Image (tube, grey):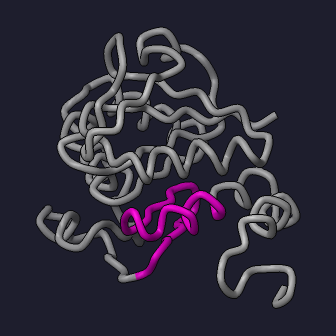
Amino acid sequence: MARVLVPLAQGCEELEAVTIIDLLRRAGIEVVTAGLEEGPVQCSRGVVLVPDTTLDRVLSEEFDMVVLPGGLPGADHLQNDPRIRELLQRMARQGRYTAAICAAPKVLATAGLLEARQATSYPGVLEAMDLPATRLLDRPVVIDDKVVTSRGPGTAMDFALELIELLLGGEARRQVEEPLMRPGHDRATA
């Protein structure tokens, strides 16, 4: 079974976090949510999430993918946490997936994972960084080898479905996507 770690920082974007967790779990992926510290996480719009565990408790465990929800100040907290940076770099060295949405691609950039890659983010986030070797694209989801980035809350479902396809294949994605009744993706048009 695929295992995915979703670190949750205070001020993360709840729509992104919940969409990622929910859809990956619908696909049968083991999703572990980990707070940067003990206790509930208050998201950017006031929703409170209760992580499964803390980051410290799972840092030594193996995961197939790490997915970073965006939002502010959540992405800032992730970016400033040396444990997250080291985890992302270790995942990259091991040839495993790293993924980030909205403002969180800047965390991948800070860890050096966007060097000589294509990426996207919430408008202005990556553009504000000095990333001359990164090709910034205006697409809902950008996959460059084992690095996946996405734009924001409105692309969270596309992002999560792409992650499912990367981990489990197109049939698993279809089985999750079909019952969601997305416009243009329902049984009548599939």
- Residue 116 in picture, x, y percent from top left: 37, 66
Work out whether residue 117 can be spotted.
yes
Q: Does 162 sit left or right of 77 as displayed?
A: right
Q: Pick the residue in front: 17 or 169.
A: 17
User: Residue 56, located in which quarter of the rendered image?
Assistant: top left
Is 15 one of the magenta-colored residues? no
Q: Does 3 sit left or right of 8 as displayed?
A: right
- Residue 134 in picture, x, y percent from top left: 31, 69
User: Residue 143, located in which quarter of the rendered image?
Assistant: bottom right
Work out whether residue 95 can be spotted.
no
Which contiguous range is marked in magenta? 139-162
User: Residue 158, located in which quarter of the rendered image?
Assistant: bottom right
What residue do we see at 49% from left, 71% from top? Answer: 142
Q: Does 159 sit left or right of 134 as displayed?
A: right
Query: Does 118 sit above or below residue 41?
Result: below
Query: Does 69 sit above or below residue 49?
Result: below
What residue do we see at 69% from left, 87% from top? Answer: 184
Q: Pick the residue in front: 134 or 81.
A: 81
Is 161 one of the magenta-colored residues? yes
- Residue 33 in picture, x, y percent from top left: 52, 28
Q: Does 98 sit left or right of 69 as displayed?
A: right
What residue do we see at 80% from left, 69% from top? Answer: 178
What residue do we see at 75% from left, 46% from top? Answer: 26
Quadrant where the N terminus is found in the figure: top right
Query: Does 168 sit above or below residue 89?
Result: below
